[in-house]
Amino acid sequence: MIRILMLLCAAAAFSGTASAQLTVDQKVSDFTQLAATYAKNYAPYEWKVQSQNFDLLKVKTWLDRVKASKDDLEFMDICADYVAALNDAHDYISFTSDYQAYLGIDVDLFDGVYLLDYVDRSKLRATAYPFQVGDELVSIDGVATADWVKANSKYNTGANPRSTARLTASYIGFRPQSVIPGAVNLPTRSTLVIKRQSGAVETYTIPWTTSGTPLFAVGPVPGLNFNANRKAPPNPVKVRPADDVTDLTADTGVDLPTILDHGLTNARLPGSKLRAEVKAYLGVNEVPPVFTFPTGFTQRLGRGGFDYFASGTITISGTRIGYIRIPDFEPFSTSSATNSFISEITYMQANTDGLVIDVMRNFGGSACYAETLLTYVIPTKFRTVGYEIRATAYWVDAYSQELEYYKSVGAEPWIINTYQALLTGIKEAYSENRGRTGPIPICAVSLDRSPAVDRTGKIAAYSKPVMLVTDELSVSAAEMFAAVFQDNQRGIVYGMRTMGAGGTVTSNPVGATTFSEAFVTVTQSLMNRKNPIVTADNPTAPYVENIGVRPDIQADYMTKENLLNNGKTFATDMFNAAANYIKNGR
């Protein structure tokens, strides 16, 4: 996921400003602004009190910590703690820093153990660092890996313990200061204890590769003057006299335009930095699935660089099974992606006995695009999820403008009446203390949706059995897709529970503090499902938030066996389960 705050000079200049920290009053002001941002806009407040036992409005203890913080980095960490206490995968605080450190490895959770699942051989040559994918990371800098993940989980919360552990593990070998304020205090080298697959335990010392400008303090930042009789401090800014400006041409022997061409005006990120410095999670938002297709699979889409989906067919025991992977719900072109999906659904309807739809490692996107695709998956009328909106002036204005638009274009009376009712509901909630609406549609005028039809009026949705595949990295719009699929009993859900990021979030971070320049994202609505969901680890509620969508058949990709054989075991089991469901209905 992003990140946190402030501007400083290069490291050489820090010696003169390292002590220029925010004042206590400034930190209190910033934290109060942060809390007020959530108090005003955060939709799941009551749910977090109930399910997470966290009341974001109770800030006394937090303010005591803020007042006692020794420096700006500690203050930033307290802010990160506060946002993490929401246990909301959609919400993060970010600080304005481009500093990051990279170790050359990535770690993930397999069979309950933290294993290497990526080694950057451009940085870590096998002759010096012979460890491999599948080896266990026992500890880093003397801290057991599981303990490190637990201590640092506030930097990448995932709404449930397993998702949080996996998200946090990605920061073992990659430390962006925008997320982790203390990343600037890393040692030059870190000591890793690695248990090889042979059973041998080996110790390695690996240097960190760093880039960007580290931030150690926000200050000096002028404070507000509440004393009318107090004189303003003198201007501390030193301005160089005109005759003291260096003559670049004379000093270098190169005229000024040439110097600029050599980099002083180059605002483009260097190509070498555009690559992912951290692999993070194999398969996330990628068109090809995380697993290797089994023998006998005939691939249709997914090889081309411009494909929106991966798809194909396989026959198992005489049963023809179709497969479509939806990698995300934010395609470059929604219309082109929708047309491609329609084409695949049409093909699958004519050539298969059943269908597997894969939304594993899908980080979401547009809920409305997801809802559109559902109209081609569900061949009957269905109820989509509603959204309980935290009513603010923004939403009153937005729905008022929608209503006025439909009036101006002469929309049918039922559409105008629907939007009038929605606006009335939002206005009523806005008049209440932290009011939230009931579940309302955000993509259509009703929660009841009809299946897609072709030009002749014939239903165009796939009508045969469907199995949906999810995991703990199926997030947000992917969870909405899964929730609607399950609520309307369209088929079975196979895999692992989804993350539990069940709302809509500000599309861009909003400023949350003034002096420290932090930014946050805020969940503004709650997905509301057709029926309350009963689980052992959350209160019964009709929400996706924290609860996630639970599978009908549990199957875990995150095993060492799948890591080492590229998911062949998982894929084989998945298609066998689909064949059994298609033939036997279970």
Image (tube, grey):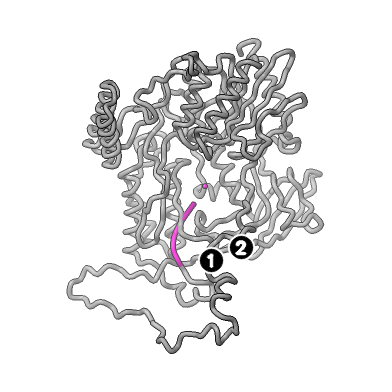
Give the camera-side residue of 224 and 291.
Answer: 291
Give the camera-side residue of 445 and 502.
Answer: 445
Percent x, y for residue 299?
70, 28
Callout 1: few (<14), some (14-19), or many (20+) C-alpha neighbours within 10 Å?
A: some
Dot 1 and dot 2 residues touching (CB under 8 Å): no
Q: Is residue 430 left or right of residue 80?
A: left
Q: Give the residue pinned by disc 2.
A: 210
Residue type at tag 2: Thr
Give the camera-side residue of 338 and 138.
Answer: 338
Magenta stretch, residue numbers: 1-7
Q: Give the residue pinned by disc 1.
A: 213
**Label for residue 302?**
none
Asked if residue 443 can be seen in this view, the reply is yes
Callout 2: few (<14), some (14-19), or many (20+) C-alpha neighbours within 10 Å?
A: some
Q: Residue at the far left: name it.
A: 229
Q: Is residue 505 left or right of residue 434?
A: right
Secondary structure, mark 1, is: loop
Residue 6: within the magenta?
yes
